[in-house]
Amino acid sequence: MVNTRTGFITLSAVYCPPKHKISEANFTDFFKTLGNRFIAGGDWNAKHIYWGSRLTTSRGRSLKECLDSNHLLTLSTGSPTYWPSDPEKTPDLLDFFITKNVCPQYTTVESSLDGSSDHSPIILTISSIIPTSDRGCESLHNFKTDWNSFPEAFGTHLAEVFKPNEAQGDDDPDIDFIPNQDFQLSVPPSPTSPSEVLREIKNMNAKKAPGFNLITPRLLKELPKKCVVFLTNLFNATFRLSHFPNVWKVSQIIMIYKPGKPAHETSSYRPISLTPVLSKLWEKIFLVRLSKCINERDIIPQHQFGFRKHHLTVEQVHRVYDSIRHCLETKQYCSAAFLDIQQAFDRVWHKGLLCKVKKLLPHPIYSTISSYLENRVFFVKQGEARSDLFECLAGVPQGSVLGSVLYNIFTHDLPQSADVTIATYADDAAFLSSFVDPIRATVKLQKQLNDTHAWLNKWRIKASAPKCFHITFSLRQGDCPPVKLDNTILPQTNCVKYLGFLLDRHLTWKDHIKAKRDETNHRFRNLLWLLCRQSTLSTNNKLLIYTTIQKPIWIYGIQIWSTASKSNIMCLQRVQNNILRVIAGAPWFARNSEIHDYLGIPTVTAEIERYKKKYMERLSTHPNPLAYQLTTSRPVKRLKRAAAQSCSHSKCHSPLNKFTYSLATDCK
């Protein structure tokens, strides 16, 4: 016991052995022996995020409940104090102080990094006056921070990004000649009407962010009919004159941090472009006329599934899966290269794009698109600070309505070969070549990559080397020889990610399902405080959290990965069983089938059947012949697996047992 100016304080050293079970009542009895004013510090072997530990244990939860019921406080450094010698273990905070009737403003806690033990001691200093610091209040910024320098730095960085890639050699003379050659007279795009403008306004999302002029979609929805007529006349004038107003070419860019990237680098932030709402409205109306012309002339190749109506990523992955599966059935080697375009939308070469538009589309549309692309400017807004205006010398506006369509036009002439299957989705491309001989398969793939590389250089497109991979799909031993792109050997891997799917060498979906299982479990642990028995949320709200936040993680692409083995699918079923048991607060003896029936949640097998049936109905009416061909199931010869085209999954028996108890009664 220590006598201070404010009275006596009892000091106590504490050690709680990890092997003993200590309840809340035991902690309460101990604190009662220390009197009405005390400081108890030591190794509690109790973890809780409340005092800075990495996670919460059962002992930490008991101690926290004791602190709350007895109105006790904790004092800790907030940093690890236990440094295990085992490299597989993670340092954590186990040593701290618990006080009663000791004002924390008169105390300071600091670490003493003594390396003589696996526990670093902490020092508590008690003062008779409130400790002060000459450094002032700690803050991430001060009054001397130049906030205007932040958007200027981002703007300067983006000005370098929105430039075309450097030319690899001399440009094709046709690129300069075609835009300047004579054109045939054509009628301008068909005029719009007030009813069409009003319909597009009603279809706009009222919650969309406005551009720099602060005009919101909600404001347009409140316009009287007379103003809608004025807008109609304005849009028709732009069609007639092939002119896009300069005031609509100003983009406001917001920078969003990319998780896991260095925060001090400008390249670690993703630019989000906010264009004026009137510009988006005009683009939607113009897109109707542009799409009609594109479809009539069949400009977009069939292998391009990105940003096209009635085209999804699942269908493109299904094409890739079907080609690989056929190779496995016929004992062939499938040599595949997966490419990703670096800054695809930001570095679209305007001169090259206009050259293709001039060759493919009528002159009024070419003139309108040319006016749309030229003299575009942007500024960066960071907080309340804004940068100066910078010019966009390349790229199509991300977030705009026309940007994705213009990119598809720009890449429509990607070289194709009868010996190689091509699957593109926006800037993600897959090339697959198959043959019984692995060398022949690679030779065909290398020829395709050589043609692709020449095409990329011609149109100033650059592949992202870290995101390009080469993989061999086969059930036979050995790999296909490596391939090159721009004289650089593509890294070989046994598993590649394409459009959110993990494709392994044998196409078992084991890696994909494992990744989805781990991601779902990680999300579940983060939301456990909302789903556990102690949560005050209703069961319906807990189910809503599961079906909207957790279930979509593994349900994506279920039509394709459902061909996996029963053991792999059972991994996801066990995850769902665990989550639903926590949501329902079911006892240990309640069967999984009871829980599913009580909560009204279908099993994984039932979801497979439901999604496959809807998917096959969708494919049967698909406008793209490449997707429609997927409805024809190739005969299964060697592989004991169900095809993705099959609407039944005979191998995936229901993993749930028949129920014999009443869950509703047990949960009560």
Image (spheres, grey):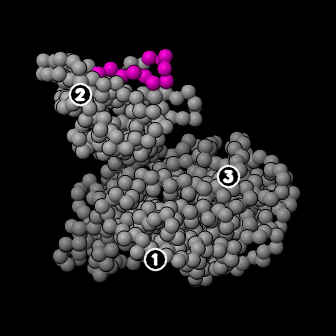
Give the image location of residue 452, x and y in percent. Answer: 68, 53
Task: Give neighbour class at mark 3: few <14, some 14-19, many 20+ (Cα, 10 Å).
Answer: many
Q: Which residue is mark 1?
A: 662
Q: Secondary structure at mark 2?
A: strand
Q: Residue at x 60, y 56 (%)?
A: 514
| Left or right: 660, with 58 as reference point | right
Give the image location of residue 445, x and y in percent. Answer: 76, 55
Residue 495 has which mark? 3
Do labels 3 and 1 touch, CB within 8 Å? no
Q: Quadrant of residue 229?
A: bottom left
Name the outermost residue toward the right.
437
Q: Residue at x 58, y 73 (%)?
A: 657
Q: Which residue is mark 2?
A: 38
Q: Secondary structure at mark 1?
A: loop
| Residue 615: in magenta span | no
- Which mark is in front, 3 or 1? 1
* 665 vs 632, nearest the viewer: 665
Task: Give neighbour class at mark 1: few <14, some 14-19, many 20+ (Cα, 10 Å).
Answer: few
Name the outermost residue toward the left.
6
